[in-house]
Amino acid sequence: MDAAIRIETVGDTRDLLGESPVWDERERALYWIDSRQRLVRRLEPASGALQQWTLPQEIGSIALGDGSSLLVALEDGFHRLDLSSGRAMPLARIKHPTAPMRLNDGRTDRRGRFVCGSMVLGRREGAGVVYQVREDAGQVQVREIDRGFSTSNSICFSPDGRWLYFSDSHARQVWRTPYDTATGRTLGPREPFIDTRPLDTAPDGATVDAEGGLWIALVLTGELARFDERGRLDSRIRTGVPYVTCPCIGGAALDTIYLTTLRDTGNMLRTDHPDAGALLAIHDTGVRGLTEVRFAARRHSGHAIAEEAP
């Protein structure tokens, strides 16, 4: 690690399973989740002000909404969380191919559609699906993009929106798929992009920087790695925390990497390290991030509809 890089723990929170950080540049606030404790958290780093909301199910991921709401992927469907009332309003329910399963990692594309993968619980069956959620003509539509995974992760998009990145943590593979931002359609089959097996770890959450670098949480080694636009390993940052889960790039100048960590997944991974579950901030990396795209949904009274896979 570059000696100039500085890593700090932010606040006093300790998550069981921290995930899905997103930076709101309007509010200069960070949102993230504790999946297992069913919490959405919000922190203003400048003041230290912390809020949190409890949801009815375990949470897979979140996306910024219209300023008064978030899009939330719960175990079996997508909801809108009203930040004033704390109420989670259902938008679309998912019928998983098998049980038990739940929704997992997700991010918005460059036009505000939410792409989210599912995961199989307690086994390595390849029943996971990658979905796309969008609002169209007053109704929420859910479309299948890909399937055949055990634990979908690392979902994010290249700066120009031409590539969709995602992984299967159990397979330790990251793929990329050509993507048409204008239509939201994939333009071809997925391509192998990064193999994390030589690094003795699995990929977890990911984000991209302004130059197109892909930052991936290497969950089993407690590292954050950057890969260039060709998939070549560029750098690795050791955090000192046993298990890291998902990064985003935020801060007033979009130059701080926020990284969630875990303490106990309730399954395979558990640690008593004092900083396990902490939110980390990584400074002085020279990185510049991109503004987080909001879920492009309007308030409506229509019912959710499902669209068949292409």
Image: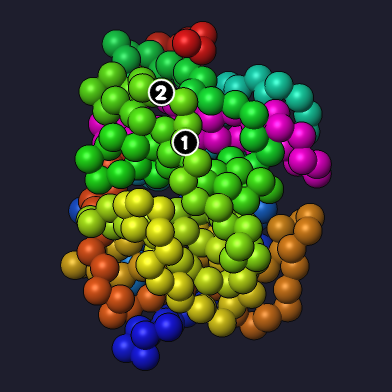
SS of the residue under disc 2: loop
Image height check: is 188 above or below 244? above
How was this image coloured? Answer: rainbow
Q: Residue at x 53, y 25 (%)?
A: 146
Q: Magenta segment: does it hold 122? A: yes
Position in image of residue 83 (x %, y %): 40, 45
**Residue 232 appears left or right of 196:** left
Q: Quadrant of residue 178?
A: top left
Callout 2–callout 1 Cβ contact below 8 Å: yes
Give, as a three-letter code, the residue at label 1: Glu
Q: Residues within 10 Å of mark 2 (few under 14, many from 20)?
A: few
Give, as a three-letter code, the residue at label 2: Gly
Q: Residue at x 29, y 25 (%)?
A: 180
Image height check: is 133 above or below 226? above
| Distance between the alpha carbons at the discs numbered 2 and 1 | 9 Å
Label 1 sits on residue: 191
Position in image of residue 299 (x %, y %): 32, 24
**Residue 48 appears left or right of 209:** right
Give, as a single range, the part of the protein colored magenta.
108-133
Image height check: is 272 above or below 257? below
Q: State whether residue 210 appears in this view.
A: yes
Q: Residue at x 40, y 71 (%)?
A: 235
Label 2 sits on residue: 188
Q: How many marks?
A: 2
Q: Magenta segment: does it hold 91? A: no
Q: Quadrant of residue 247?
A: bottom left
Q: Which mark is residue 66?
A: none
